[in-house]
Image: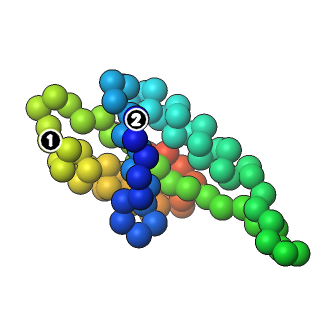
Amino acid sequence: GYVCRWGGEEILFVVPNTDTESCEKIAKSICQKIHEYTFKENSRSFNISMTFGVYSVTPNENYDEGISKVDKLLYKGKNQGKNCVVSK
């Protein structure tokens, strides 16, 4: 698989040969672990949240179409209150 920064605050995970359900499980696990981790800076402590859009590209689609669809899912999750995983 691949992980890269995509846009300003977005990170793209490409997980080849993996179905949507498995990708959702991976995303939920990452989301939970990040939210539970407490960051510390000097005397401050804080937690962060992440929102994931999950989409499986079919053999008939190109990656640009898949990116567009997963981007819409990501923003749907952000509008639902963040710190969640949204898929089709």
Name the residue located 30 percent from the left edge and 35 percent from the top edge.
56
Quadrant that contains the C terminus: top left
- Disc assigned to residue 74: none
Circle 2 residues within 10 Å: few <14, some 14–19, many ≥20: few
> For the residue labelled by badge 1, is the local secondary structure a helix, a strand or a loop?
loop
Q: Can residue 35 be seen in this view?
A: yes
Residue bearing the label numbered 2? 1
Alpha carbon distance from label 2 to label 1: 17 Å
Up the image or down, 11 lies above or below 23; here it is below
Q: Which of marks 2 and 1 is in front?
A: 2
Q: Quadrant of residue 62?
A: top left
Name the residue located 14 percent from the left edge and 37 percent from the top edge.
61
Q: Is residue 87 visible?
A: no
Residue bearing the label numbered 1? 62
User: What scheme was used to colour the molecule?
Assistant: rainbow
Camera-side residue: 36 or 75?
36
Name the residue located 84 percent from the left edge and 75 percent from the top edge.
42
- The residue sitting at the right extreme is 43
Q: Quadrant of residue 7?
A: bottom left
Task: Give the image location of residue 86, x and y in percent.
Answer: 43, 45
What is the three-letter code of the residue carrying label 1?
Answer: Asn
Q: In which quarter of the image is residue 29?
A: top right
Circle 1 residues within 10 Å: few <14, some 14–19, many ≥20: few
Task: Identify the mark nearer the N-term, 2 or 1.
Answer: 2
> For the residue labelled by badge 2, is the local secondary structure a helix, a strand or a loop?
loop
Name the residue located 34 percent from the left edge and 30 percent from the top edge.
16
Task: Give the image location of residue 77, x and y in percent.
Answer: 45, 55
What is the three-letter code of the residue carrying label 2?
Answer: Gly
Task: Give the image location of residue 78, x and y in percent.
Answer: 46, 61
- The residue sitting at the bottom extreme is 43
- Left or right: where 53 falls relative to 67: right
